[in-house]
Amino acid sequence: MRAQVAKLTEGAPYCRRHCVNPHLHDTVDYQGSSYRVEGILDYGLGGRVLRLGRLCAGSEVRYLEIPGGDLVDRVLLLAEIPALDITTPPPATIYHDGESFLLKLSGTAEVAVAGRVPDRAPGRCTLWRYRAAGGRFLQIEAWPDAVRMLAGASVHRSMIEIRPATPETRPG
């Protein structure tokens, strides 16, 4: 059965559009908006790498993470939020926006930056990622100069489309 599924999806347009990680200058379509991937953040954390693409559409900025593996059917969309009134290290449970968020992942991350990601530079940060009911997420990053916070939700992979950069969409 698995071999049949692999054969059916090999080279299929769905996989080319929906099953790849974003790269610099790609276009990501989500809910009627087209975002351009202006930067990539790679967080090396405990033997794994979390890759966030910084998506921009005008003044709107989001961050997209696609978990590894073609069988994962959810992606994570985050946006920066104003700092919560908490200290670092934050507690194991955070109440935010009417939900209780539970700590799921934390540690010191080595961060690599490609492209344009204002307010973040290569180096180290301490990262805490929380999860609440309904696939909602909260991420707190303690950098040497500031604390940054992101919030968002997981969405089905079929809700986004990633179109590779072309010579026309790459900066000149």
Image (tube, rainbow, N blue to C red):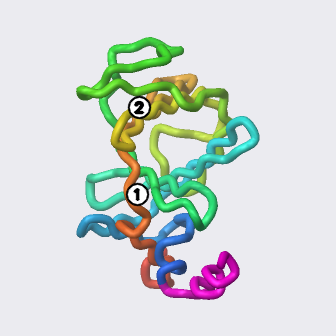
Name the main secondary structure of what is drawn in magenta.
helix
Q: Where is residue 163 in the image (x, y as percent from the top left)?
A: 45, 77
Q: Where is residue 18 in the image (x, y as percent from the top left)?
A: 48, 72
Q: Which residue is drawn at 39% across and 20% down?
A: 94
Quadrant of the image containing the N terminus: bottom right
Instruction: Give the Cα distance between marks 1 and 2.
Output: 16 Å
Q: What stretch is highlighted in magenta?
A: 1-13
Disc 1: which residue: 55
Could you tell me if residue 171 is visible in this image? no
> The residue under label 2 is which amino acid type?
Met
Magenta stretch contains residue 48: no
Specify the quadrant of the image occupied by residue 30: bottom left
Q: Which residue is drawn at 39% across and 14% down?
A: 86
Closer to the N terminus: mark 1 or mark 2? Answer: 1
Q: Where is residue 40 in the image (x, y as percent from the top left)?
A: 55, 54
- Callout 2 crowding tier (Cα within 10 Å): few <14, some 14–19, many ≥20: some
| Up-down relation of residue 152 to residue 141 (above or below) | below
Residue with the most extreme right position: 47
Q: Position of residue 78 (x, y in %)?
A: 39, 46
| Up-down relation of residue 49 to residue 165 (above or below) | above
Specify the quadrant of the image occupied by residue 105: top right
Q: Nearer the viewer, residue 145 or 26?
A: 26
Mark 1, secondary structure of its residue: strand
Q: Is residue 2 left or right of residue 47?
A: left
> The residue under label 1 is which amino acid type?
Leu
Specify the quadrant of the image occupied by residue 12: bottom right
Disc 2: which residue: 149
| Up-down relation of residue 11 to residue 60 (above or below) | below
Q: Which residue is drawn at 34% across and 51% down?
A: 61
Task: Give the number of the disc on residue 172.
Answer: none
Q: Nearer the viewer, residue 156 or 43?
A: 156
